[in-house]
Image (spheres, rainbow, N blue to C red):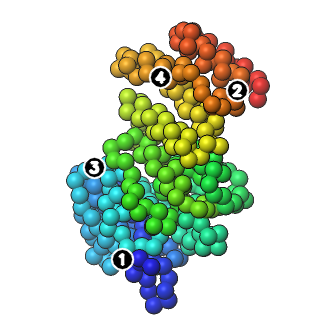
Amino acid sequence: MRGKGNEMSEPLVSVIVPVYNAEKFIEKCVASIRAQTYRNLEIILVDDGSCDGSGELCDSFALKDPGIVVIHKENGGVASARNAGLDAMHGDYVGFVDADDWIDPEMYEVLLQRMIAENAQISCCGTAIVTGEKITGYFNPDMDVQFTVGGADAQSELIRCSCITNAMWDKLYSAEIFDGLRQKTGAYMDDMAVQYLLVARAEQVTYTARPMYYWYQSENSITRGHFTTRFFEWITSTEERLAFYQEHFPACVPEAYNQYIGLCMDMLLITWKMPEWKDQNQELVRRIAAPLTGNYGDDMGRITKLKRQLVKIHPQLFIWLNPFFEKLKARQG
């Protein structure tokens, strides 16, 4: 084992928490990790150049608990902070928690048990979405779902992102699948840019819908912030994933292609009148109108095919007629 372990030979779980200006949340987050029923934990707090009192709070936690390690670094973003934690960890398994979120006391015990029982390298759980003081939704509201998949089936679940999500934090990973692989730094949707590569390294991925990760939503969350041209990186990541599937998981290509085209269309609808998006919109039109090869479009719905043709003929016509297509789609159920 790569981990330190203990006298009972329990594997060590490293929990990496990227911290940036989170002094209002970090105490609750760390308390939820320290309260885990699985006790052999290494908690790595990565202070990513915080400007508030987060770094000092992290140091105070470490003084009280020898199982907490603090890393202070220049600001580089959440992916950079996670990478720093991965470089410093000792665990046989690794999980991630964002500093403004918290976890169920049994999360890592349950995920590790399922991982061992199913001979899996990634173990996933359900996520509760928290807004203000209330749970406002779940990634997958069907609490009874459990399954284990591998190969193309695991990638297909990831594409749908209802159970196996692109998030880093609702999972426990075998540390070995990170060997030689780190998150891309500075990228928008950096979780998505690496998750399919991690799933590809796993022989099995297991999932339980029990919601054990609490994802706090605020106005400053990256997924709810101001729409900027950085969102185009989401398109690029989706295209890179598609290219990976072409080479390694051809059965996933039609589903991934349809998602890619749909994302391009959605982005075009949102940004068409934004002056700063002029260049990106021209690129979106080019990508949507690009000739289909292979069986990419076999599973594409009739309405999506028609929308794609309109983009090729006249993008503005596509914009004008989209409300009609949405009504038609709603009628078809």
Q: Earlier in the sequence, mark 2 or mark 1?
A: 1
Give the amino acid type for the residue marked by disc 2 in the picture: Gly
- State which quarter of the image contains the N terminus: bottom left
User: Which labelled disc corresponds to residue 301?
Assistant: 2
Give the amino acid type for the residue marked by disc 1 in the picture: Gly
Along the horizontal axis of the image, is 89 left or right of 260? left
Give the amino acid type for the residue marked by disc 3 in the picture: Gly
The residue wearing badge 4 is 284
Dot 2 alpha-carbon crowd within 10 angstroms: few under 14, some 14 to 19, many 20 or more: few
Q: Earlier in the sequence, mark 2 or mark 4?
A: 4
Q: Nearer the viewer, residue 307 or 241?
A: 241
The residue wearing badge 3 is 76
Q: Residue at x 59, y 66 (%)?
A: 120
The number of numbered badges drawn on the structure is 4
Residue 218, percent from left and from top: 44, 44
Residue 333, percent from left and from top: 76, 29
Q: Residue at x 43, y 83 (%)?
A: 5
**Within the image, what quadrant is residue 265 found in?**
top right
Q: Earlier in the sequence, mark 2 or mark 3?
A: 3
Badge nearest the viewer, 4 or 3? 4
- Rounded to the nearest angstrom, the CA distance separating label 2 from label 4 is 20 Å
- Rounded to the nearest angstrom, the CA distance separating label 2 from label 3 is 41 Å
